[in-house]
Amino acid sequence: MIGGIMELGESSADTVIREVFEEMDLTISNPKLVGVKHFQTRGGKIRYLVFLYKISDFFGTLTSSEEGEVKWVPRQDLLAGKIDLADSMDEMFPVFFDQMSSELVYKRDDNDDLVRKYF
């Protein structure tokens, strides 16, 4: 999973193209927006939107960076939990793989417990 911050004047697609190149050394085209993950900080003062993209058109050699190690893994190993993932990455699988959800929302309930909901 890669991430980054949109620069002034950039679209979300432009951002993912730039971030993939900066963090993985791959040149991509035609990123497909498949969903959104969003949540608010405690107290509701800041709202985060995370755009979730799939990419199949690329060239270059996958290269790790100071951001971390990157590698190709079989989807079945990923879904079977055989791969160490970034925190909450597995919670995004329904958006990436099921095609039944396009939105993952985190909210806090009355007990301040984090609840996730798919739309």
Image: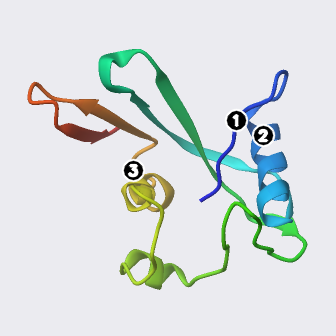
Q: Are marks 1 and 2 in contact (CB under 8 Å)?
A: yes
Pointer 3 or 2: first along the chain: 2
The residue at 45%/80% (across/down) is: 83
Label 2, residues with CA under 10 Å away: few <14, some 14-19, many ≥20: some
**Residue that mark 1 sits on:** 5
Which of the marked residues, 1 or 3, is nearer the chain's N terminus?
Answer: 1
Evaluate whether residue 98 shows in this view: no
* Separation of marks 1 and 3 at Cα, in angstroms: 27 Å
Q: How many angstroms separate mark 1 from mark 2 (CA)?
A: 7 Å
Q: To which residue does mark 3 refer?
A: 100
Quarter of the figure with residue 51:
top right
The residue identified by callout 2 is 15
Residue sitting at the far left: 111
Q: Mark 1, residues whose alpha carbon is within 10 Å: few (<14), some, or many (≥20)?
A: few
> In this rendering, which labeled residue sits more in front, label 3 or label 2?
2
Nearer the viewer's eye, disc 1 or disc 3?
A: 1
Residue 18, horizontal then vertical, whole percent: 84, 47
Q: In this orientation, which residue lies closer to the viewer: 80 or 63?
A: 63
State left or right for residue 114 relative to residue 48. left
Q: Residue 100 location, x and y as percent?
A: 39, 50
If you read the primary sequence from the N terminus, does the residue marked by circle 1 or circle 2 appear first? 1
Determine which of the numbered discs, if any, sits on residue 110 in the image. Answer: none
Q: Amino acid at mark 3?
A: Met
Res. 113 visible in picture:
yes
Closer to the camera, 86 or 58? Answer: 86
